[in-house]
Structure formats: C-alpha cells, structure tokens
Image (cartoon, rainbow, N blue to C red):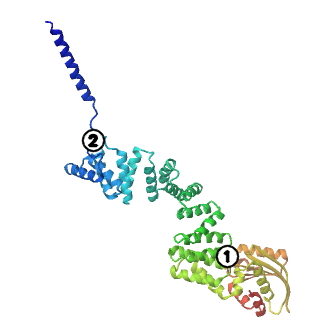
Amino acid sequence: MDLLPIVVVVIFLSLVVLMGGIFFSKGKPKAKRGKAFKAKDHAQILKEANRRLAQNPKDPEALLALGEVYYAEQQWEKACKIYEALLEVAAGNPEIDEFTVNRRYGLTALRLNRLDDAYKGLVVAHAVKQDDFETCFNLGYLEFQRRQYERAMIYLRAAVRLNPEHAMTQRYLGHSLFKTKNYKDALAALRKAVDLQPDDKESLFAMGECFHELNQDDQAIRVFSHLRTDPALGPSAALFAGTIHLNQRQFQKAVMDFEIGLRHPDIKVEVLVEIKYRLAAAYLKEQEISKAVALMNEIQQIYPNYKDVATQLSRYKELNSNRNLQVFLLSATSDFITLCRKITLSFFPKAKVKITDISVQKNDWADILAEVETSRWSDVVLFRLIRSTGTIGELVLRDFHARIKDLKAGKGYCVTAGVFSDEAKKFVEARLIDLMEKDKLMTLLNNIDSSQKAMLIEE
C-alpha cells in the first residue's frame, strides 16, 4: 500500500518526460535544403548537381546551385539555360526567389544579345522589386534600343536615383531626352555622363547638338571644332561646325571646317555629299566659283538628282565663264554698284550720260538716275538693275513705276539676270518702261568697254 504513491509519481514523471520529448522534437528546425552543396568547391557542386538532375531534371536545389556556379564563372549560355529552366519550376514554389531568377535570366539573355528574352525576365523582376539598380538600368537600355524613349526615361531616371554616378545611365538618359527634344535636361545628363566618362565622344557630340538647338552656338562650335579630327565623328562634327559658321556668314571659317571634314578617309556617303554641297555654297559666297562648280560636278557623279545641284550647276557654269556676271549676281554691293555705273555709262553708245543719283535696295537691286543727251533727244532716265536669276513679278514693276514718277524721270529701264512674269510684262505695255531680261543683260555686260572691263575684273 505504501508503494502506491511512489508508483503514481514515477508514472507522472515518465509522462512529463515523454511529452517534453515530443514537444522539443516538433519545435526543432528542419534541416536546410541544399545542405549537400554547402562548403564545396565548384567542381564538387557541379558533380553533385548533375547527379541529382539526372534523377530529377527539375530539382530546384540542383538548378539553383548550377546557376550560381555558371553565373559566377560568366558562362552566360549555360547560366541562361539554367535560369530559363528555373522559371518553369518557380511557379508555386516559395523556396525559389522569383526576383533573383528572373533578374539573372534577363541579364544572361542580355549578355547573349537575346533582347526579347532579356526584356521579359527583367520586366518580371522589376514588377517584384522596383528599387534594383541593375534591373532599372538594363530595362532603360532595352527600351532605348527599341526606340521607346519615353519608357526608357522612366527606368533610367529610377536608375539615376539609385546610382547617380553611373556613367552609362546618365548617357542613355541624356540621349533619350535628346531624342524627345528635351534639350535642356538632355544637356545636363550628357554633361554628367561626359564628366564621368571623358572618352564618350558620342555624348559629347550630342551635347554639341543640344547647344545648337538651344541657340548656344558658341558652345556648340567649341564642341564640334574639338571633334572635327575624331576618326568616327569627325566628318559629322565638321559638317555641323561648318554649317553654323555658314549661317553666321563666317564663310572662311566654314570653308576650313568643311575641308577638314573631307580629309577623313572613311566618310559615310550621305555625309560626304552634304559636306561637298555646303562647301560649294561657302565657295560661292567667297566668289570661288570654279571650286564650287568642281564640287557640284563631283556631287552629280554620286547623286545625279541631289537637291538643286543640277540647276545650280547650269547657272554657275555660265558664271564661271563670265566674270562680269559673277560681279552682277554675287559680288559685294560696292563692286555691284561699280558695274552698274559702267553699264549705265555704256548703255547709249556715243551719248553724253551724267549719273545724278544712286540708291540700293537691300542689295537686291540698284536704282541709277541719269541725265542722257544724244544727238536726237535728251531726257532723265531711271535704270533699275536687279540681282536675280528668278522671275520678277508685277509688284517690283509697280514700285519701279512709282519711283520714276517721284524722280520725274521720262523713261525707265528695268534689267535682270532672270525673266519677267506675264503680269509684269502686261503692266509695262502702256508705260514708258523697257524690260531687259538675261539675254539683253549679257549683251550689255559683253559690250562694256574693254579698258573698263579690265579695271572691273582687276583682283
């Protein structure tokens, strides 16, 4: 009877020990999966992973282990295949990091230039985690390559916030902004990109374009002048620099720019032709007609119908052979006026001519008032000599007629290197105005006294 309490206590203690054992057994953590791959070198991991994959091709632990090895060793082809396989087994498997798998699949596909696959992987990775720099930058790069510049800017701006000192992010952001004509912001990003990576000549060139678009041509000229000798960008830089100088009427500087551009051995044909076209324009402004004609002949051999080359060539071939016509159409105002005086003085052979007034209208034409006395008549005559090879309309003749009345001239002669419209000819039918088109002008130019002509063409 005395043993009963002891037995009860023993049984009770046994039950407590048993329950405690069960409790601690249930609370013990499970052994971590992938234990077989820990603390092993790559060769051992590859051996173990391939062994397990032979038994189960979709073994996630083995695939993850192989992916880690191939990714670390930059074996992109093999790594890409592994992460592509992991995408198939990732669904519904909480032990697989969806972000990492998609991110690495995207990055390895990008290394292999599989851009569509790279885009798919990175888009999913970005949906899982928006603040990863690599994902944002590469998605921005891919959108840039697709010419989706607005979308590229969204990713690239996010990447800049995460890493503002990454040169390529600033580069592609700057170029995307430039493509969307946001030149001010583009300039800031491109300047940062060049600061971080000074040998990025394409970004420097884009900076020059931004300066030009923002009407900051002095800065643009500095950039393009610096790049004129670059083997790749030199021809285009010279074209830009020369064009800006041409628009600024700095013709000698434009000639120098274009000539530097043409010295490059390898020039894209479209750039080559445009440089020659604009160099010809600069030569014409400098009255070097023979050089301009030679360039236009070269352009015609490459592109027979390039812009207005055929029209200009027919015009300037004649100019090249007639110095007086060159002066009439192209020379400075002072030389033009000198020629007009000589035309007026030789207009009426054996007449006494006294020039009393000369006026110039925006270098477009000259009005010369003269008192003319011949053996048969004497009168005040107004000459208008128009510097144009185009068609002169009625409005110019109406203005000329009003001018004749104001000056109380008895007669007017209107001379052009072009032609007069039908309306202009009808206007003068009942008025004391004679029209002289190019053929008559050429006669006047050829009949100028030889001694005066020698003085006129004296360099």
How far apart are labels 2 and 1 at the CA level? 77 Å
Q: Residue furthest left?
A: 1
Residue on which the image places disc 1: 252
Quadrant of the rendered structure where residue 11 is? top left
> Dot 1 lies on which element?
helix
Residue type (three-letter) at the residue carrying disc 2? Arg
The residue at the point 36 percent across, 57 percent down is 74
Q: Residues within 10 Å of mark 2 (few under 14, many from 20)?
A: few
Residue on which the image places disc 2: 33
83 or 335, which is in the foreground?
83
> Dot 2 lies on which element?
loop
- Dots 2 and 1: beta carbons under 8 Å? no
The residue at the point 53 percent across, 78 percent down is 305
Left of 12 or right of it: where is 117?
right
Q: Position of residue 295 (x, y in %)?
A: 58, 81
Left of 179 or right of it: where is 435?
right
288 or 230, which is in the foreground?
230
Res 150 label: none
221 or 378, which is in the foreground?
221
The residue at the point 78 percent across, 83 percent down is 338
Q: Position of residue 424 (x, y in %)?
A: 70, 77
Q: Position of residue 346 (x, y in %)?
A: 79, 89
Does the image show residue 442?
yes
204 or 41, which is in the foreground?
41
